[in-house]
Image: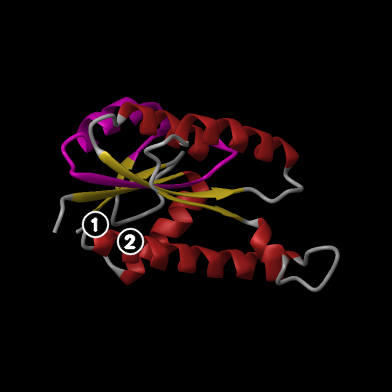
Amino acid sequence: MAKIAVVSLGGAGTSIMREMLKIDSDYDAYNVNERKTLKNANYFGYEEIEVLAQELSNYECVVLTAGLGSSGGEALADLYGMLEDVKKLCFLVTPFYFEIERLMRSRAQLGKIISDGFEGAVLSLNTLLREMDESEPDKGKLEKLIREFDREMAGLIVEMMKEVG
């Protein structure tokens, strides 16, 4: 199996990583966040991105996951640019259409990441709204749908990692 590291960045990335660790833990897990929230992952703060990039340069493949439009997306865009000689797979989540400020930031972040060599997937939280019957989303139902989305995303990432390894 290829030497693979998985890096979750920010809240959305952390939620997806939490689900991934329930499915499979046969990879080195790294978490970038404001505080340490995952027990089975190597923790780095946002200010330590350069140190993390140096550590990740020893891997054959680095899988990156984050929600775009916030600190996690910004850190992912920076880290992505630092990992020049490493195969990168990205699994990115874009914000809801009504999160205007985050949506605009996510587009700028995507501009830093998407290139001819991009590998991975960009999924939108807007797909969850199709499953809502109400014109105004119910917070409880939306949170449940987001948890399901995180589990599905984690499963997708684990399956793609098997193809790499």
Which residue is label 1 attached to? 164
The residue depicted at 72 percent of the width and 68 percent of the height is: 130
Give the left or right position of residue 115, taking residue 140 as reference: left
Q: Quadrant of residue 100?
A: top right
Q: Amino acid at mark 2?
A: Met
Residue situated in front as seen by the camera: 40 or 98: 98
The image shows residue 94 at horizontal and vertical percentages of 59, 48
* Range covered by the magenta-colored residues: 44-71
The residue depicted at 62 percent of the width and 69 percent of the height is: 145
Residue 150 lies in the magenta-colored region: no
Assign the N terminus to one quadrant of the image.
bottom left
The image shows residue 81 at horizontal and vertical percentages of 37, 28
How packed mark 1 is, by other alpha carbons closer than 10 Å (few <14, some 14-19, many 20 or more), is some
Q: Quadrant of residue 86?
A: top left
Assign the C terminus to one quadrant of the image.
bottom left
- Circle 1 sits in a helix, a strand or a loop, which is it? helix
* Residue 106 makes an appearance in the image: yes
Q: Give the answer, above or below, for where 2 lies relative to 147.
A: above
Which residue is label 2 attached to? 160
The image shows residue 65 at horizontal and vertical percentages of 42, 48
